[in-house]
Image: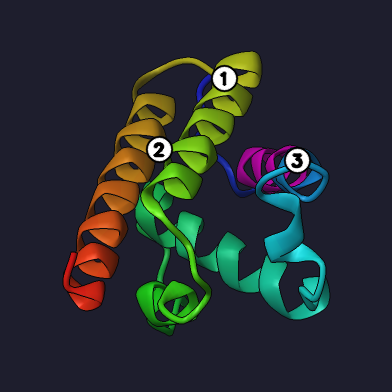
């Protein structure tokens, strides 16, 4: 089954955050997360990216820029995200989601490294 409905994206987001929120390295980043605010924004982002559904507003980079996130954190994030997709979905849209996650992690890692002057 491919990842091509809002309900499927909702499941992806739920399963993904269930894993990262308790992950020994990523979990601490989510301790203070306001899930009622965060989850609808993340859903809207992925609906826009994967389903071309309008409604996402915001800048996802800015939300991550001042959180002391390093490349290793993005690498773990991508690994978990792709694993969750592989556990539940397959197909063109599922591959698009994994590729977009990898692109975002690479871009964020690069921007944060550039910002730090490293």
Q: Nearer the viewer, residue 86 or 19?
A: 19
* x and y, in percent, of residue 55 in the image: 47, 77
Mark 3 or 1: the one toward you: 3
* x and y, in percent, of residue 83 in the image: 57, 22
Give, as a single range, the part of the protein colored magenta: 7-16
SS assignment for the magenta stretch, majority: helix
User: Could you tell me which secondary element the residue under label 1 belongs to?
Assistant: loop
Q: CA separation, marks 3 and 1? A: 22 Å
Q: Residue at the spot x=58%, y=64% of the render?
A: 42
Please give the residue where the numbered disc 1 appears in the rendered image.
89
User: Could you tell me which secondary element the residue under label 2 belongs to?
Assistant: helix
For mark 1, does the 10 Å Cα neighbourhood hold few (<14), some (14 to 19), or many (20 or more) residues?
some
Q: Quadrant of residue 118?
A: bottom left
Q: Earlier in the sequence, mark 2 or mark 3?
A: 3
* x and y, in percent, of residue 21 in the image: 78, 50
Q: Earlier in the sequence, mark 1 or mark 2?
A: 1
- Tell me whether the residue at label 1 lies in contact with that at label 2, contact meaning CB atoms closer than 8 angstroms: yes
* x and y, in percent, of residue 109 in the image: 29, 56
Q: Nearer the viewer, residue 86 or 9?
A: 86
Mark 2 or 3: the one toward you: 3
Q: Nearer the viewer, residue 55 or 78?
A: 78
Labelled disc at residue 97? 2
Is residue 109 within the magenta segment? Answer: no
Is residue 8 within the magenta segment? Answer: yes
Q: CA separation, marks 1 and 2? A: 10 Å
- Tell me whether the residue at label 3 lies in contact with that at label 1, contact meaning CB atoms closer than 8 angstroms: no
Labelled disc at residue 23? 3
Q: Earlier in the sequence, mark 3 or mark 1?
A: 3
């Amino acid at each position: 089954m491919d990842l091509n409905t809002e309900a499927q994206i909702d499941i992806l987001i739920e399963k993904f955050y269930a894993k990262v929120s308790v992950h020994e390295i990523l979990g601490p980043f989510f301790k203070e997360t306001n899930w009622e605010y965060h989850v609808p924004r993340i859903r809207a982002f992925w609906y826009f990216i994967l389903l071309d559904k309008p409604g996402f507003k915001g800048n996802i980079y800015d939300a991550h820029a001042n959180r002391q996130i390093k490349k290793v954190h993005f690498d773990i994030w991508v690994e978990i995200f792709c694993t969750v997709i592989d556990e539940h979905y397959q197909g063109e849209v599922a591959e698009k989601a994994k590729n977009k996650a990898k692109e975002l992690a690479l871009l964020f890692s690069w921007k944060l490294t550039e910002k730090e002057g490293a």
